[in-house]
Image (tube, rainbow, N blue to C red):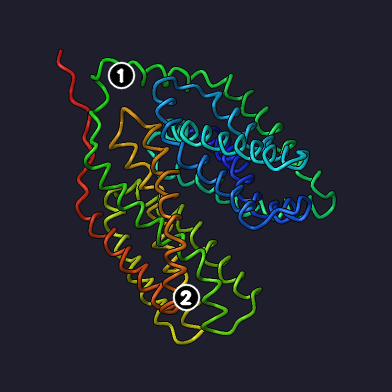
């Protein structure tokens, strides 16, 4: 593993995703400044989410056909400068356009960033993908803090801080990308293998489709836990909002640690093995959490819930890249973007279940969905290997 390069692309991931994390914190300032209603404000968030996730597979296909490492700094630059422009726009549709540009930048970055992370990770691809994903996680955590501090001090003009961060990071990435001769040579080798079909195994679309079902099930469970753990802390245990936020933070910290640990296990025992072994723990943990009758029991279950949801994440991305060895960018776009968005779409339905039947039923529903994903996980076959070349 080239540690310097994997840390560099992880830094780019942080700088890209800090904008997505900051946007929800920026929107209340925008709403207050322009008198927007809730529907119009939510439309801005919807635009970013759709563009940053749904079109990732399209940019992934572009990355597979015309791999360009400079997509990485360009994506970071667009994502940051697009969000920064929000504070300087004068109308709703100009703000909308700026957020669209930010979402396009995020979508452009992720497939090529994941390709590079795969390429420079050597024999430790799952650990490399874990480090890459941690960069994004840190970005989402730091985004709201940075936005609140900057806009609280400077008003809407405070969004400029995201342009400064983006330009600085993109400049450093562009400088290093220009010097990555080995990576450029690797990209040409992959492209050549793609053309002649001798070194790279054929895509296994059937297994990739099954893996996508597994990833969507995990995404639904993850989004549900992120949304309802704080609410459950308040409604079931009568805790304060601050304590509820602390519980969610603890869950996420356990998850990030588990992400790295899961990557190490995946490199040692295989991505498919870790997915098949860990996935059955998700419905078990969700069910246990739903039945916790005391606050102490709920705290005790959170590490298991975090481990089961985060540990297989990098393995999923790497296994998807192995199933679609000739379209690594497309596989990355689906596993990192599209599947996660499809998971998030179910949030309103989970909210209806909580309103109608209670929070316990919501976590039981998550357990059922995760159990279906665990069943599909057991059907995954090993990825195809390169066919030996004949003399």
Residue 175, position as x, y percentages in the image: 64, 23
Query: Relative to residue 259, is residue 177 depicted above or below?
Result: above
Residue 122, position as x, y percentages in the image: 40, 33
Is 135 on the left-hand or right-hand side of 67? right
Say what secondary structure mark 2 lies in.
helix
Say what secondary structure mark 1 lies in.
helix
Q: Residues within 10 Å of mark 1 (few under 14, many from 20)?
A: some
Q: Quadrant of residue 82?
A: top right
Residue that carries the numbered disc 2 in the rendered image: 355
Residue at 42% of width from left, 64% of height from top?
349
Determine the CA span between mark 1 and mark 2.
Answer: 54 Å
Residue that carries the numbered disc 1 in the rendered image: 193
Q: Nearer the viewer, residue 370 or 33?
A: 33
Question: In the image as oriented, which residue stretches furthest toward the right?
Answer: 154
**Quadrant, the C terminus:** top left
Query: Relative to residue 330, is residue 222 depicted above or below?
Result: below
């Amino acid at each position: 593993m080239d540690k310097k390069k994997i840390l560099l692309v992880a830094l780019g991931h942080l700088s890209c995703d800090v904008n997505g994390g900051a946007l929800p914190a920026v929107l209340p300032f925008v709403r207050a400044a322009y008198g927007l209603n809730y529907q119009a404000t939510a439309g801005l968030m919807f635009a970013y989410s759709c563009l940053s996730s749904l079109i990732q597979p399209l940019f992934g296909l572009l990355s597979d056909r015309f791999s360009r490492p400079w997509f990485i700094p360009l994506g970071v630059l667009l994502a940051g400068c697009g969000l920064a422009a929000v504070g300087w726009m004068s109308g709703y549709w100009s703000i909308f356009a700026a957020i669209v540009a930010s979402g396009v930048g995020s979508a452009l970055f992720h497939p090529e960033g994941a390709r590079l992370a795969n390429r420079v990770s050597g024999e430790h691809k799952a650990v490399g993908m874990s480090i890459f994903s941690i960069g994004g996680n840190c970005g989402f955590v730091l985004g709201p803090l940075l936005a609140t501090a900057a806009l609280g001090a400077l008003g809407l003009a405070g969004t400029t801080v995201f342009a400064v961060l983006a330009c600085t990071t993109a400049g450093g990435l562009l400088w290093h990308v220009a010097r990555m001769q080995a990576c450029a040579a690797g990209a040409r080798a992959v492209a050549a293998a793609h053309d002649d079909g001798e070194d790279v195994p054929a895509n296994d679309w059937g297994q990739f489709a099954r893996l996508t079902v597994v990833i969507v099930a995990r995404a639904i469970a993850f989004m549900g836990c992120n949304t309802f753990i704080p609410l459950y802390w308040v409604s079931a245990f009568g805790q304060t909002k601050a304590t509820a936020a602390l519980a969610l933070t603890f869950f996420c910290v356990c998850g990030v640690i588990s992400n790295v640990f899961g990557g190490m296990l995946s490199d040692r025992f295989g991505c498919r093995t870790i997915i098949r072994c860990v996935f059955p723990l998700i419905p078990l943990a969700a069910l246990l959490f739903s039945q916790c009758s005391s606050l102490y029991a709920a705290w005790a279950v959170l590490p298991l819930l975090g481990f089961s949801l985060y540990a297989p994440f990098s393995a999923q991305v790497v296994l998807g890249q192995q199933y679609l060895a000739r379209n690594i960018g497309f596989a990355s776009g689906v596993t990192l973007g599209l599947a996660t968005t499809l998971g998030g779409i179910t949030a309103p339905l989970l909210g209806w279940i909580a309103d109608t039947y209670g929070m316990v039923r919501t976590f039981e529903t998550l357990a059922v969905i995760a159990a279906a994903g665990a069943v599909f996980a057991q059907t995954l076959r090993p990825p195809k290997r390169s066919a030996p070349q004949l003399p």
